[in-house]
Image: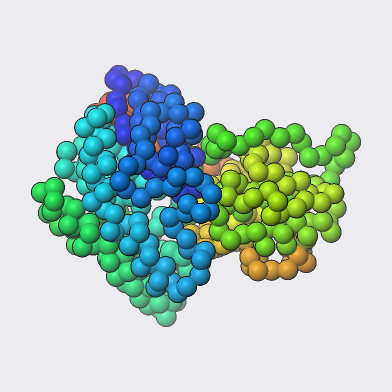
Amino acid sequence: MSASRRFLLAMWDGGGTVPPELGVAKRLIARGHQVRVLGDPTIEAEAEAAGCGFTPWTTAPHRKSRDRADDIIRDYAGGSMLKLMNDYMDEFLGAPAPRFVADTLAELEAHPADVFLCDQFLPATSIAAEKLGLPSAALSPQIWMVPTRGIPPLGTGFRPSSFPLWTLRDALIRRLMTAAFDKALPALNGARALHGLDPVRSTYEQILKPDVTLVLTTPAFDFVSPHLPEKAKYVGPMLDDPSWAAPVTSPNPAGEAKPLVLVSLSSIYQDQVETLRNIVAGLASLPVRAIVTLGESVRAEEVQGCENVRVLVSAPHTELLKETSVLVTHSGHGTTMKGLAAGVPLVCVPMGRDQHDNATRVVERGAGVRVSKNAPPAKFAAAVTEVLGNPRYRQGAQRLAHAIRSGEGCVDAVEVLEMLGGVSPAAGSAARRRALLRDPSTVV
C-alpha cells in the first residue's frame, strides 16, 4: 500500500445496514487508512470498536437510542403505502436534505477527508462532497434497489419475468416509484442550489451521483440486468457481526445431536413480537434445539422461551451458524447473507422493506422457503420440518456459499476505494484497474 487516505463515512442507524458498512470501514483501516464516521449517536460504540473516529449528526434526523420510541421511520405503524412513502420523504429523504448537507460540510471542515463515503439512501450528503470536489462512493448494503429495467421493482417480491404483461406491470411500478421518490426532488435541488450546484432531474439521479456505488451482496444471489449503471460494482457481502453481540455457549448439551434452529427477526423493531411468539410455539413441538435472538428493540419479557428454545437479546450469528441446520429469518439482507455464506438453508418470514425481495431470491435460488409473518405456529413448524427434511434446500444454500466465498462476479471494495483516493492498486494492475472501474463481471 503506497499511501494512507482519510475517509469520511456518512451513515444512519438502519439496523442491519450498520455492520456491513462498518465492515467496509474495518477493511480500509486494516489496509492502513483512516476512517471517520458521521452518524446517529447509537452507532458511536460500534464505530469506535471498528477503529473509526466518530461524530454524531447534530441537525440532521437521527436516533437517540435503539428503543422503538426513537424510531425515525415507522413503516410498521400501518397506513397506506402512499402515506408511508410521503412520511419517508418528509421526515428523512427530502425535507431534511439541507440539514444533512450542513452537518456533512461542517464535519468535512473540522476533519478534512480525501474520499467521501455514504449510505446510498443518504443522497443529500453527497451534495457536500460534490461541492468540495471530493471523490465519492455510495454503499448499498443490500440488493440493488434503484429502479432498473430487467429487475423486479423493490418491495414487490416479484420474480423476473419476460412475459409481456408482467414486463409492462414492472415498468409501470418503476414509474410510480420514481414519481414517489421525486417528491424529495425540490428539497434536494434546493440544497444543491444553495451550494451552487446545478439541479438534478430526479431523486434517483442524486442517489447515483457518487463516482461509484458499491453493492454489498453477490450477483449470484441478486437479480441482475444488463441495464445496471456502469458505476454499480458488486463487491460481495460484509459478514461482520455487530460489536454488541454477546457470546453464547452451544445450545446442544454434550452427547445430544438435535438439529439447531437459529431465529432472528431483525435487530430493529418491525412489530415482530407476535410472529416471534408463534415461531417459538411452533418450534416447541419439534425435536430441535433453538436459539431466538431479539435484538435491542424487542424487550426480553415480550417473548418467552420454552424447554427447547432459548430466547436471548443477542448472540454472534457467525459462530452459531457453524452448527445451525435451519435459519428462520425476516430476510433482512445481512442475516440472509450470513446464513447463506454458512451454507445454511432458510425459512424466510419477510416483514416489509426489501425483505420480500430477499425472500424471493432465496426461493428462486432453491435455498429455502417463505412463510407469512401472520402464520400460526403449525405453519412455522411445518416449514422448518420441510427444510430440515429436504436436502435440496441445503444444496441450494451451499451453492450460494461457494459463490460468496469465491467472490464470484465481484470486485474488491477496498481496491476500488483506494483508486478513488488516488492510491495505486496491486502490482500488474493496468488491466485490473480497467476491470475494477469498468467491468466488474470479469474480476474475482
Nearer-the-camera pick, 362 or 256: 256
**Residue at horizontal 62%, vertical 51%?**
298
Above or below, 120 against 115 in this view is below
Give the answer, above or below, for where 233 lies relative to 380.
Answer: above
For the view shown, which residue lies furthest in the top direction? 2
Res 22 → quadrant: top left
| Residue 280 occupies quadrant | bottom right
* On-image quarter of the C terminus: top left
| Residue 112 placement: quadrant | top left
Counting from the top left corner in percent of width and height, residue 230 is at 29, 50
Horizontal and vertical percent position of residue 311: 73, 47
Task: Give the x, y percent position of residue 3.
Answer: 29, 20
Give 140 or 167, whichever is nearer the viewer: 140
Residue beneath the point at 85% across and 37% down = 253
- Residue occupying the point 47% across, 52% down: 70
Q: Please give left or right for residue 122 compared with residue 354 in the image.
A: left
* Residue 64 located left or right of residue 358: left
Residue 440 place in picture, x, y as percent = 36, 44
Residue furthest to the right: 255
Q: Is residue 209 visible?
A: no
Identify whether 216 is placed above or below 388.
above
Left/right of residue 150 with respect to residue 334 in the rendered view? left
Can the viewer see residue 46?
yes
Q: Report the quarter where the N terminus lies.
A: top left
View extreme (left): residue: 196
* Residue drawn at point x = 46 percent, y = 40 percent: 42
